[in-house]
Amino acid sequence: METYLFWLVPIASILALAFAGYFYKQMMRESEGSPEMQKIAAHVRKGAMSYLKQQYKVVTLVFIGLVILFAIMAYGFNLQNHWVPIAFLTGGFFSGLSGYLGMKTATYASARTANAARNSLNGGLRIAFRSGAVMGLVVVGLGLFDISFWYILLDKCIPADAMNPTAKLCVITTTMLTFGMGASTQALFARVGGGIYTKAADVGADLVGKVEAGIPEDDPRNPATIADNVGDNVGDVAGMGADLYESYCGSILATAALGAAAFIGTGNTEMQFKAVIAPMLIAAVGIILSIIGIFAVRTKENAGMKELLKALSTGTNLSSVLIVIGTFLILWMLNITNWVNIAFAVVVGLLVGIIIGQSTEYYTSQSYRPTQKLSESGKTGPATVIISGIGLGMISTTIPVIAVVAGIILSYWLASGFDFTNIGMGLYGIGIAAVGMLSTLGITLATDAYGPIADNAGGNAEMSGLGEEVRHRTDALDSLGNTTAATGKGFAIGSAALTGLALLASYIEEIRIGLERIGTTLLELPSGISITIREASFTDFMMYYDVTLMNPKVLSGMFIGSMMAFLFCGLTMNAVGRAAASMVEEVRRQFREIKGILEGKAEPDYARCVQISTQGAQREMVFPSLLAIIAPIVTGLLFGVPGVIGLLIGGLSSGFVLAIFMANAGGAWDNAKKYVEEGNFGGKGSEVHRAAVVGDTVGDPFKDTSGPSLNILIKLMSMVAIVMAGLTVSWSLF
Amino acid sequence: METYLFWLVPIASILALAFAGYFYKQMMRESEGSPEMQKIAAHVRKGAMSYLKQQYKVVTLVFIGLVILFAIMAYGFNLQNHWVPIAFLTGGFFSGLSGYLGMKTATYASARTANAARNSLNGGLRIAFRSGAVMGLVVVGLGLFDISFWYILLDKCIPADAMNPTAKLCVITTTMLTFGMGASTQALFARVGGGIYTKAADVGADLVGKVEAGIPEDDPRNPATIADNVGDNVGDVAGMGADLYESYCGSILATAALGAAAFIGTGNTEMQFKAVIAPMLIAAVGIILSIIGIFAVRTKENAGMKELLKALSTGTNLSSVLIVIGTFLILWMLNITNWVNIAFAVVVGLLVGIIIGQSTEYYTSQSYRPTQKLSESGKTGPATVIISGIGLGMISTTIPVIAVVAGIILSYWLASGFDFTNIGMGLYGIGIAAVGMLSTLGITLATDAYGPIADNAGGNAEMSGLGEEVRHRTDALDSLGNTTAATGKGFAIGSAALTGLALLASYIEEIRIGLERIGTTLLELPSGISITIREASFTDFMMYYDVTLMNPKVLSGMFIGSMMAFLFCGLTMNAVGRAAASMVEEVRRQFREIKGILEGKAEPDYARCVQISTQGAQREMVFPSLLAIIAPIVTGLLFGVPGVIGLLIGGLSSGFVLAIFMANAGGAWDNAKKYVEEGNFGGKGSEVHRAAVVGDTVGDPFKDTSGPSLNILIKLMSMVAIVMAGLTVSWSLF
């Protein structure tokens, strides 16, 4: 048995963390610039850290509550594996740590980036990108570290004599999903809280500063400007880090669980073990190739925009090409059943990610017709900008959905050995495609995370008066980041859909374990045949629980799932609206009461604005996040297993489409405004520009709060369902 | 056997048509007012009729294409019943006729309503409401007429000796669904085309007239004003008439088909017959009670707003209470199995409709907090109005979804005799709840349809200079209509969800017939057991086709279904945007080129604007409508039966929630603007008002184009799937 291959997983994780430390130290050696720059950076850093401290306090309370619940279920009623409460805690802890470390790096890097940008574009890029890489590598490193730790621990601690080795692997993999739930829970709070914070500050700063007072973005006279820069860090850095940590672990763990399940009927422990470690190995190889890719991002001094873009693309493309080769190699070494097909499923996953990324770019970049036409619709005012943007966003869901559908069918078909009735392997193929998509996360996240760093560098340059050229360079870096981030977003959304499906399949697996736990050994199927739980296939469970599309409980669950996606978005949209309104009032108050603020003679009260955003975000994040945890539990108690599966699938299909709609509409509005600002249709200050600014403001919560949170919502609901499966199989009202 | 009871159905339909004729004549006897008023009414009438003529030309072409396709399938390949092409045609014809007659009445009634409103509010109400009743009664009368005609014809013409009597009833009821598809197809074109027309004109007229030139609504100097009034007729009257004709027939036919299917295993032909005619009888009783309700709407001369509202509520409430009694009576006479429970399912349906209506009113009326807060968000500009409106709309989906879920579970549970495994009767119960909800359509549609008549009367009063007071009275009638229309909309959306489910179940039934047609007699189930097609239950078909939630074809279908709802909305939103932009340019051109137009010295070129809206609507309606027809066919060819069922259910769950979101957000924006205009937050002309107008303009296509079209999309996709089932069972790619 190729056991030795497993050790590649912890090794790769430590390698990732080591390189993250190296890049961090490298960045810290750079100069942070003038005292003024240092002061501003310290302001932002302090605000961001104090926000995170506050946020983690609230999350800790929620975690305490949930851990008590799990402890009662696990130790009191024996409805769960005894490791669940602890695994849940570590997942939350590491997800929070990813966000913290990424944000810490970002807040130290922004002034340094601004300072380096005083000399050259290339210098700025190097610092910003390497700092982004810290975040990318921390996320994947901690993820694989946590996975290997738990795998080794559980493998040692779960007694093998109590059950046969195949069943043992299933228990291990599904227990590990609990730490995925911890990560999801933390990530949802981070995304929702951070998203509300950043957009309340951004919308508030824009509405009063840019629109009413007519001062430019990041102007030090605007009291909300520090809060706005803090927001980029807590939302786009800490939130995204926690989010992708969760996606990464979720896809690997769900696929491992499916691998364990796929071979449960065969009794072939060796193949089952290989199927479990295959996703981890693909991820491990991906880490190494990401590091190579990161080093490949280099360009000559005084390079122009075009060369910089080429340098970035070289890095990500290199990693993508290498991962294909690496996957074939590692699966060949594992010699897993049907390995060529499974390797092709990885290619399918990568292609789906790339297609979604390209389509995102087409619909949201001002280089293409859709966004240009959106700008043009500003000629007839803000209302037509909104109508056209919503239309654009809705239409833009077509290509990603078709890509995901093709990905589902192809990866299933390949992994099943071209046999649609081979459900276990087919679902495993879908999981593998998701893992393939996220395997190079180390570098794709780096190209994504350096955007907010460049953005903050721009803010620092503006506030410390470094002059037009530096600001121009940081803007160029930021806009370069937008282009590469489109692909990154494609991978995030696409992987959420596929991971959601894999988690759903894991839920069925957890049902099996839950039934065994409450002492059920035989399933009596509707056909009258009885079958042992261990032998039961996916289809047998579907029959047993009547999870067909004509069961009213399934239908009810689906309606609730669709509704959850909309309700969740509605709550977060309104939260941003309310928090932004308090910010607007505060900024207006300061302009009114602090004399000399607009003349630059008096310093505004930045701290008060930071506080308002913090409080607003904390107050508003709790209800929608708890709702996501409660919905699957209540649905399970009412409608049992069929209701929960309906809920998950309704939430997944509606939530996925809704997430793309919101992300793309928001992105297009943002760039439509930029297109006008580039001098089209009258340029800055024209009526068209005013209309485009309205679109951009509406788009802010679309693309940075509600849209990305949906990705986590989809997965968190599945995770909660998995962890609560023990309860659901024991009791339901109908 | 209580065969004689069936004759109540044609009798009620003729009664409805007779009273419609009576009310029409009564209205025509009233004076149309001054020559100026008559001239304007003639303008609007001519525009509306010429639009309908153009529209029906395009629809005829589409119908010719589809009938040829059906004829080839029916006569060439024997994939369909031979009556299908003809039934399809009559459905389209009667749906079109409902729209035509309703619109004709409305265009004759508006000037008469304005003229009567010169004397009293009550006089205006009487004419407008009775004219609305013409439409309500025409819709239900033609619907039941078509149903009885086909039932009698097929009962005579389908040879009973070829199959046993139970199978015969199934063939009859599912063939009749074909005329439902004809109605749906026509209705979709009517809703989409009419919706684009009316909103292009409305948005165009508002953007240039109100916002740029600062002239009031319906001002005769605005060249788009006639087009705007024509739009109310072609969108809100003809479109709605065709739409509800389709809902009404669809719910009755789907339920009849489920009734036939529920007893197919028992061989109890008598009970099967009763289950088939029960929904028709409930509808027939509903017609008679609607007529009673219409007569109950009366109030004393010079009644105030409050009394008028009371009069309207008395009518609808009376009908609702009576229909409960009537249902118990008719089901008792039928003595159908489990009749008490089935009667309670009707009550459930009525209650769900009422709850959705109340929730719609709460979220969209300016008498309640949500809309008032939406107005207040205008203080920080148009962007926050849009953000808050979208948030409000998304949150407002919660109560309707919970109501529908409760309705599904309860009506299923009741009709199944409290046994969830009794799927046939349970699904029949869901259908019966939908029929119950729509049973009093005669009067609910009257309270809905008189709104646009009052609106047009207001337009006529404004253009012919009848003075403030008349306009004030017609506005009051219009706003009264908005309140009652909220309940009407609740019934329309709720019934669409339940009917969609019933149609989905009928699809499975059609699969049975399709399989028999291609010569399959035995189903080999995955468990290894074979079963004859005639004996196969719903669950057996689900097993046979593996329609479980882990089948990748089902999942793919669901993603495509969700995407279809968004894509369809996006296309119609953009269509309105484009058509409105041409209107804006034309109005600007006329203001620029026709001298003296704004001083009221020269007459604008109304006809050109009517033409632009007509052409825009015709050009834009074809693609989205054809897409709705093509999607289920292509999905079927790719992924077979599991894919189609996934598509329908994905479209249903996402589409339902999306439809509520769009309708409520749009309604709330409309009334938030009215709330400001009533003098709150600065009133007309203030910054808040300008922001609220942006919201209202964005809401127009939400609530009057995309939202209501979704209702039909959901059902049309099911209808197409049913009619194409013969093809889907014969061949698919995967």
Image: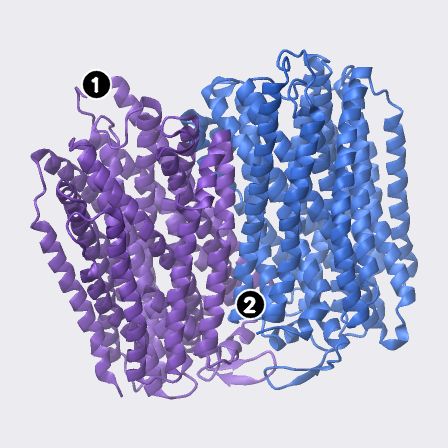
Chain colours: A purple, B blue
Q: Nearer the viewer, residue A168 or A212?
A: A212
Q: Nearer the viewer, residue A511 or A482?
A: A482
Pointer 1 indicates a residue of which chain?
A
Disc ID at residue B294: none
What's the amino acid at mark 1?
A: Glu
Q: Is residue B263 above or below residue A334?
A: above
Q: Nearer the viewer, mark 2 or mark 1?
A: 1
What's the amino acid at mark 2?
A: Val
Question: Where on the picture, by quarter, is residue A259?
Answer: bottom left
Pointer 2 indicates a residue of which chain?
B
Measured from the top left, where is residue B125 in percent x and y?
A: 76, 25
Q: Quadrant of the N terminus of chain A?
A: bottom left
The residue labelled by disc 1 is A599
Question: Where on the picture, by quarter, is residue B530?
Answer: bottom right
Measuring 57% from the left and 54% from the top, which residue is drawn there? B564
Measured from the top left, where is residue B2 in percent x and y?
A: 90, 61
Disc 2 to disc 1: CB gap under 8 Å: no
The residue labelled by disc 2 is B554
Measured from the top left, where is residue A248 in percent x and y?
A: 31, 63
How many neighbours does mark 2 have within 10 angstroms: few (below 14), some (14-19), or many (20 or more)?
many
Measuring 42% from the left and 25% from the top, which residue is drawn there? B379
Q: Quadrant of the C terminus of chain A?
A: bottom right
SS state under label 1: loop
Question: Mark 2 vs mark 1: same chain?
Answer: no
Question: Where on the picture, by quarter, is residue A476?
Answer: top left
